[in-house]
Amino acid sequence: MIEKDRMPRLGIDLGGTFARAAVVDEQGRILAADKVALSERTPSAVVEAIARAAQQALKAAGAVDVNACGVGAAGQIHGESGVLAVAPNLGWRNVPLGALLAERLGHGVRVVNDLRAAAWGEFNAGAGRGSQDMYTVFVGSGVGSAVIANGRLVTGGSGLAGELGHTKVVPNGRKCGCGELGCLEAYVGGHNLMAQTRELLASGKSPAIRELTGGDPEKITPVTLEKAAELGDAVASELYERVALMLTLAVANQVTVLNPARLILGGGVLTHCPGLRRRVVEGVQKYASTTSREGLLITEAELGDDSGIIGAALLA
Ligand SMILES: [Zn+2]
């Protein structure tokens, strides 16, 4: 008989196109995993897709017993309500995902923001092991961060702590996906990096972006701007250095405020843009206050796409 708190748990990673489920042991190891494509995005269809992925993962793990489930979902989740207040990927507002899923699965479900889940996964089973105070920054299609202080995930008054992507870097600047103006994410998030690169291509002022894409805006990726800057293109370099500095200052200022022992950098944009990652690492050494970064270890996320599912399971 397995003790209750040592039972494997179910972790769910709910993205915009797939629901992934994994059976995770108490040390954060994935015992089995499966995924189901989201053909429809209505709450009931998504709950069914999650349930199917969960059943398949449980079967693959050898029909183990689980009594807890954690869901990491992209979006804003207020406190422990399990309600996805805003989930742009799914086009949802105020969907009580936790309650719907608990009813379907027959046991407790905890819903957390995907980046907070990923940070918790890294903290327990990845690049954060052994530290108590960790700050994690993910730059992918969006920009997010999570704070772990004294070994605890900082959630904030209404569960929204860590929204680095929506800190303002330009008063009345570019419109962000959240609806506000001048957010960091509106400049550095992968979607917005591509949008700004497309604008440069359309302006006709960047020979390197034209050369890299053959003039086709569809060929632009989040990496195109960095590559164009490396080719010495003047307007591409100007934009690239500007957005890199925005990200760097934002991260360095958080280091000054939080004084973490470890800074973990992850997400697709930072993984695929080594120049951007280097600027952030060097910039933190330059712009975070000298005392706040004493003993700071800056490292890359280790668990890749699995961090969210592992963290969600461990938070269940
Ligand atoms: Zn925003």
Image (cartoon, rainbow, N blue to C red):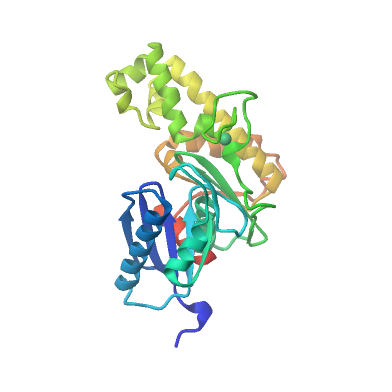
Location of residue 110 in the rendering, given as x and y in whole percent from the top left corner: 53, 63
User: Residue 179, image x and y in percent?
Assistant: 56, 32
Which residue is rendered at x = 31% and y = 49% of the image?
Answer: 39
- Residue 145 in the image, given as x and y percentages of width and height: 57, 46
- Quick one: which residue is furthest to the left in this view? 214
Vertical side of 86 occupied by 238: above or below:
above
At x 43%, y 33%, the residue is 191
Residue extending furthest top?
A: 204
**Which quarter is ligand 1 in?**
top right
Question: Is residue 16 something that shows in the picture?
Answer: yes
Residue at point 66% right, 45% down? 293
Task: Report the quarter where the N terminus lies.
Answer: bottom left
Residue 126 visible in the snapshot: no
In the picture, measured across the screen, residue 77 lies left or right of residue 190, that is right
Closer to us: 185 or 128: 185
Q: Nearer the viewer, residue 210 or 142?
A: 142
- Count of numbered marks: 0
Rendered location of residue 308, percent (x, y): 46, 56
